[in-house]
Image (cartoon, rainbow, N blue to C red):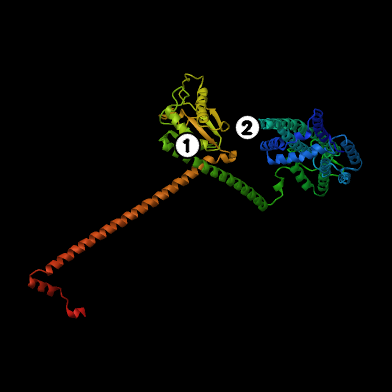
Amino acid sequence: MKDLATAVGIFGGFGVVITANILEGGNPMSMLLLPPMLLVFGTSILITIAGGTLPDAKAAVKALGRAFGGSGQISGADAVPQIVSLADRARREGLLALEDMVKDMDDPFLAKGVTLAIDGTDPEEVRDILEAEVSAKKRADKQSAKFYADAGAYAPTIGIVGTVMGLVHVLENLAEPEKLGHLIAAAFLATLWGVASANIIFLPISARLKRLSELECARMELVVEGIAAIHEEHENHERWLVSYADMVTLLMVLFVVMFAMSQVDEKKYAQLKEGLAAGFGSSDSLLVGSSSLHDQPGSAPVDSVSPQLATANLDSEQRQVVANAVQQAAALQNQRSWDEAAAEAERLEKVRATLTEALEREGLAGDVATSYDHRGLVISLVSRHVVFQANLASLSLRGQQVVDAVAPVLRSLEDPLQIDGHTNQVPVKPKYYATDWDLSAARAVTVLRRLEEQHGLPTARLSMAGYGSTRPLVDPSKPGAQAVNKRVDIVVLTDLAPQDAALLPDAAAKQEADAAIAQEKATGKAQKKARTKAEKKAARKAKKAEQAETDDTHDSDTDETDSPDTDGAHAAAGRIAPDPKEQS
């Protein structure tokens, strides 16, 4: 049934205004002036559109039909009998029986909820879907109501603007008194239509849409609860029975197999018993507190089986095959561990090279020593200068420069870092700290805080440890050892498994040795190439010198031939000229 309250109220309101005007002797047609009406209605609606979006305006226009015509489904009272009927049929015939009733439903929201329940959608998911639709409707209705509320707020102001415009027109025509009355009436009509449109049209429509939204959303929420109740009532709360039945079936099959094996082959049964006992963490019996199947009448007892039973009945060749397989498996595992360690060593070596480059740029390459242990790459601040003053945990200027040089490289990594503090082995109690433990921990904290606070290293990556004087870097008896052992180590921690990390130092050492050999070969090739080049150059020089000497000898012979001593020349020619017989 349509609810025409808005139409009755608006038209009735205008009817009362017109009736009052007539009773006062006015002419209703005098109120219907196009300019003030166009100004108030047109401007109010347009500036309301300007404050929103075009889809909002379209939705507001569509909502006018609901405001004036009402809705056939605005109350939840008519939905209750339908939901009760659905629940009754679902209880008697099941959810699938509701499929025929969905076709006859005139409420699409209820039909959608019932369809989801029939399709087997999880009850919580059904509730979430329907509640999301209710929330979306609330937002859309609220926006439509806001559109008309905004128009009602703008209309009186626009009416005042129209009145001011009319009064300006009146002042322009003061020379014609006969027109002033008509002009003043027209000016005040703008205010009349502004106030009337706001309070008789726009604001009532806004209130109407809000009320309809409340009623319709309340009805939809009632439908959501009804669908949820119907669905939950038919949810299977005894699913655990299926899992329990499966477990019982598997146990039955297990014991049947065990019984069959014990009757056929006692040795195989004993092997099965031993394997199951090892798998379940027991070496005595399969089930604690139970008796063996062989304790039953008609069964022979079986001796306990040792772990070596698997190879006890094999000949020497078969045992060798098994031993080879075990060795191959161990070798594969060892190779995998070595490959993991080698790959990690290669990665950390690149980090070490980057650190070295950064330190060389700052002229600090000799202030840091690097090494590898099972934890990863160890960067030791072992400057030949003073890093920490005696009995103090504050970094010297040189120590600050070293930390600042390595910090950008450490920040670019993702590995966790551990800062280890150390003291030297001088048997003297620290002046400002209780023990060497406190002093070493304080030194580690100093470096950690500088990395975190001044260079932005993430806190989650940092940790520290103090070792006191227990881990010297070099033999304390050597000269200068105390200055070196008073240090801080920054450890780039590896994520290798313990068995793989144990191989990391050897893998790093092998890579360093391979790099040294490759460097030596490259150097040897370069030296050989340089030597060959020098030899070729020397040979070219010797050849040029020999050619020059030959040219000088030729020039001397020519000078003797051209001398005026003709007799000597002929004599020389006679001596030199060969015998014609010898030429032939």
Q: Nearer the viewer, residue 357 or 380?
A: 357
Q: Quadrant of the C terminus?
A: bottom left
- Badge 2 density bin: few <14, some 14–19, many ≥20, Cα 10 Å: few
Residue visible at 87% across and 34% down in the picture: 77
- Total marks shown come to 2
Q: CA distance from mark 1 to mark 2?
A: 97 Å
Taking the image as shown, residue 136 lies to the left or right of residue 228, namely: left
Residue located beneath label 1 in the image: 370
- The picture places residue 527, in percent across and down from the top left corner, at 36, 51
Rendering coords of residue 440 (x, y %): 50, 25
Residue, disc 2: 172
1 or 2: tag closer to the N-terminus: 2
Q: Nearer the viewer, residue 545 or 312?
A: 545
Q: Nearer the viewer, residue 228 or 400?
A: 228
Is residue 126 something one can see in this rendering?
no
- Residue at the right extreme? 92
Please identify, in this view, whether the residue under mark 1 or under mark 2 is nearer the observer: 2
Q: Residue 202: x percent and y percent?
A: 75, 33
Assign a secondary structure to mark 2: helix
Left or right: 454 with respect to 13?
left
Task: Classify mark 1: helix, strand or loop.
Answer: strand
Image position of 367 (left or right of 377): left
